[in-house]
Image (cartoon, helix red, strand yellow):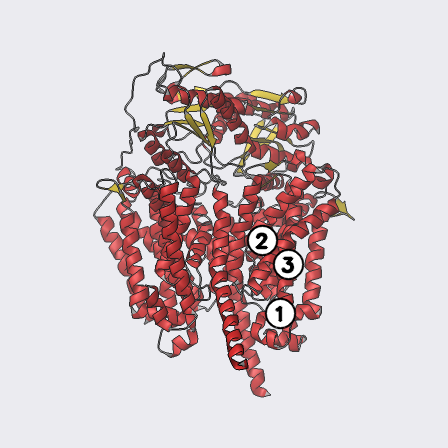
Amino acid sequence: MSETSSGVSGRPDLKRFATWDTAIIVLTVLVLVVASVVVDNFGTSRNFTFMVLDLMPILLIALPMTFIIVTGEIDLSVASTLGLTSSLMGWFWNHNLSIEMIIPLCILIGAVAGVLNGFLITGLGLPSLAVTIGTLALYRGLALVVLGDSAVADFPFNYTGWVTGTLGDGSIPNVLIPIIALAVVFGIVLHATPIGRSLYAIGANAQAAHFSGIRVARTKFWLYVVSGAVCGLVGVLWTLRYSSARADNGAGLELAVVAAVLLGGVSIFGGKGSLPGVIAGVVLLTALQNALRLEDVSGQALNIVTGALLVLSVLLPNIVTTVRGNWQRRRLRQSAAR
Amino acid sequence: MTPLAIQKPRKPAMNFLKTRELGIVLALAALILYTTISNPRFLSGQSIRDNLLNTAILAVMATGQAVVVITRNIDLSVGSVLGFSAFTVATMMSDHQGLPMIVAIVVGLAVGAVAGLLNGVLVRYGKVPALVVTLGTLYMYRGIVYQWAGGSQVNADELPAHFLNFANDNFLGIPWLVLIALTVVGGATLVMRNYRVGRELYAMGSSPQAAELAGIRVARNLLGTFVLSGALAGLAGVLFAARFGTVDASAGTGYELNVVAAVVVGGVAVFGGSGTVWGAGLGALLLTVISSALAVLEINQFWQQAIVGALIILAICADRLVAVRIARSLRKRDAHV
Amino acid sequence: MFRHRLAVTVSAASILTLAVAGCGGTTKESTDNSTAGAQAPASANPNAALKEGLKIAYLPKQLNNPYSDVETSGGEEAVKELKGEYKKVGPNDASASSQVSYINTLIQQQQDVIVIAANDPNAVCPSLNQARAAKIKVVTFDSDASKDCRDIFINQATTEGIGQSLAKMALEQAGANGGDIAVLSATPNATNQNSWIAVMKTELAKPEYSKLKLVKIAYGNDDDQKSFQEAQGLMQSYPNLKVIVAPTTVGIAAAARYIGSSSYKGKVAVTGLGLPNQMRQYVKDGTVKKFSLWNPADIGYLAAYAGASLSSGQITGAEGDKFKAGKLGDYTVGKDGEVVLGPPTEFTAANIDQFNF
């Protein structure tokens, strides 16, 4: 699929991101294989369920985040939107709304949070980094206002049990269904539709995209709405998984999501990256964390690894390009001298 | 608006700066007035002192961040650098009780400067965007502290008295912490406004390519900027350890967002090239006063974060408004010439 | 046009939501949430020998908390006596969800006993029940999980005992004329702090406490800095404050540090539950006259023996089960699977140097 992305704009330096995509996918497979062999209890089906549950929030939010970063923007308010919907879910439940109504309502509220982001960014032309730092504080603050420091926990078991449960014989976790469905939809949209191509165009050069007939502001606006809606969904899933609606749910998750997306080879300047790379990035981080914990290595070692991988994901391709450039120049000089 | 500030630093630019920072000052004054009317103790000596002490650490970090943001970069690693420095200094002081305060400060600055240098080198020579680098080092520096501390903690009773007293001692009636913060904010404001290197940083933020072409030593300036931000976060770590006395590996977690918020509220544009350091200092003061005013006014403490968020959005909207107006007036003037 | 479409989409979505809601569904009131415990009650064999080589894992609220370090150190000692394998894991922040991944890991590692201080009584429940389904015994200490998902809870002292002792210490230190008192607690949904405060309030309603007025319950979230600032806020808001009662070790240390370094020293008393090592300095300089606590190391110690007895089949956690806990002597399981450690100790300048934890 990396061919698709490199085919989109055909710029030569896209190739090196395609290589990073491949590298991260290979690395992820390698880690999974090695961990299954070396780490006791890693390759069991129960552990697989645990891992899927752990990666669910990051992976789902990373899907729209990839779109947004590809267009050269960012959304730091995602974790706070998650917290807000989780809070509201508890509040609605306490006010005796039915869970069947609460779930779509929460997704809708997430989308509304995205509408505010989108309006401030595309309607008023404000920088997305600053806006979403503001709404990061605002939405988390509203979450606290709604539920304070209390927790709501008595959600019906057939819903909480579904989220933590498995399909039929017990080797495939239920939540894998929405994860795969959403990943496939987002993947097709990004890599096989004109919409996806327009996102790369916007990220590569918004002005050029505008003049070639792409409605830049409108596209970006809807990306934020989608991002908000997905965060609303994740807020619901998170709440049901821990059967606990709290205002501080998911705090700090935004950095993990952005880190995973960048690690997956998406350029922070926009225009480059692929969804398979991002998914590999999320799986890599989760699998490493899980394996290290099973080996009783403190979770903090992983922080160092995450940080280093993040920097390396951009640094290594840059070094390769520089070295290759120098080498080519030297060869040119040599052939000129000859 | 920034090229203007460089070419003719007189009337329009000064007016603009005045209105922007004046806005914060007015908001601050209104808030203090309202709070004091409902509870006069808000203006008592102890309360003013507490507010200033709480602002000091944030203001020191906001100074470094403002300079970084003015050059169109960002430093998200400051919270982790603070934790690193606080834990280093606290461990050192508890092991060597006799060390004077100045050694603690120098060590804190040095630890931070090294961390900042690594950020700068990666940004400049690795050509990695600052957001990515500092997000990466945010994780790395924090991870290193956790590895090192391993869940241990330095308690107030293990620290020498002179170190802890530093946070409460006064010099000419003003607490040391506040003096340090004032010096840092004042010094940086002066350099950024009146010195060549300061104007170069604004130029770099306005247009990085143009700055490079104009012969500005971009590499040196950029490294210096990150070293400054790191060193000030390191200094903030020392102040944190002295003020709170209890230091574990999680010290300063999440501070980066407060610092960026202070800078943005203080009128420094995230796209670089405009804003002032003392505006960022005022932003830090405003955020601190809001949180203590809410406690005094007995407004549900949960509203605090929502208000801060709304304020950030308001601040960037205001900036945008001013920028649009200035651009329009510039266009008009150009048309007349 | 663009705005128009947005409006249409949003209203369509709301109509859809309402339509779904109209069909009725699962609401809080319609739900009967009786999740049964995962294990069928086995019968206890009081004569069974304690097994050796048991893998006993401690999962405190968070790792870098000196109080839980002392608790788990007692556990380590007991596990050594039991010839078992001791292990301590945990998150770096005390958030509700962070413990779940650690429980999952312990399940995968097939531990025999999980000793946990729950950050949130419900968030850990599904995982703990999975652990119990995998034949792992679950003992809670310090902060209980919902009683459906653990076998035994080690209670440091009875809730009544602590609440009464807090109220009594506040009265003693408010002076002859009484005055305003405030509570500086941990998080607002910390299980045990809330139950102690509830008892304290009932005590304060009694006539002998009429001179005291509880003006505020502030929350420092067991975060040193937040507690420090909350103490500061209390002093600004309540000029007549006489006593700050902090039923948490983080809160009392932070409050004592603030009062000790401010102009309120000597005018406002600080009391509550604290660790002697952390409080020694403030007791000696007069900021704090008296505070109390049980010996936290004994909690961890007792939890290990309770877990080993469960795992060996000596007890099942039913009311009336009896077991021996090494140097601490005999214990009986009470109602709802609770085991009470004993009465708290009061610390003053006179006796504080006899304690080192």
Which mark sits nearer the N-terminus, 3 or 1? 1
Extreme front residue here?
A338
Circles 3, 1 touching at the beta carbon (< 8 Å): no
Amino acid type assigned to the residue bearing label 2 in the image: Val
Q: Disc 3 or disc 2, which is closer to the eye?
A: 3
- Position of the N terminus of chain A, as image quadrant, is bottom left
Q: Residues within 10 Å of mark 1 (few under 14, many from 20)?
A: many
Q: How many numbered dots are placed on residues in this image? A: 3
Residues under labels 3 and 1: Cα distance?
14 Å
- Answer yes or no: are tags 2 and 1 on the same subunit: yes
The residue beneath circle 2 is B78
The percent position of residue B332, horizontal first and vertical second, equals 55, 83
Q: Which residue position is annotated with label 1?
A: B218
As helix, strand or loop, the secondary structure at mark 2 comes to: helix
Chain of the residue displaying label 2: B
| Mark 3, residue position | B227
- Under mark 3, the amino acid is Val
CA–CA distance in space, label 2 to label 1: 22 Å
Q: Is residue A33 left or right of residue B40?
A: left
Give the secondary structure at mark 3. Answer: helix
Of callouts 2 and 1, the N-terminal one: 2
Disc 1: which chain? Answer: B
Q: Residue A122, how many percent across, how many down?
A: 42, 68
Query: Is residue B22 visible to us here?
Result: no
Read off the chain for label 3: B
Give the percent coordinates (x, y) of residue C274: 58, 28
Question: What residue do we see at 67% from left, 48% from top?
Answer: B48
Which labelled disc corresponds to residue B87? none
Tags 2 and 1 touching, CB below 8 Å = no
**Mark toward the start of the polypeptide (3 vs 2):** 2
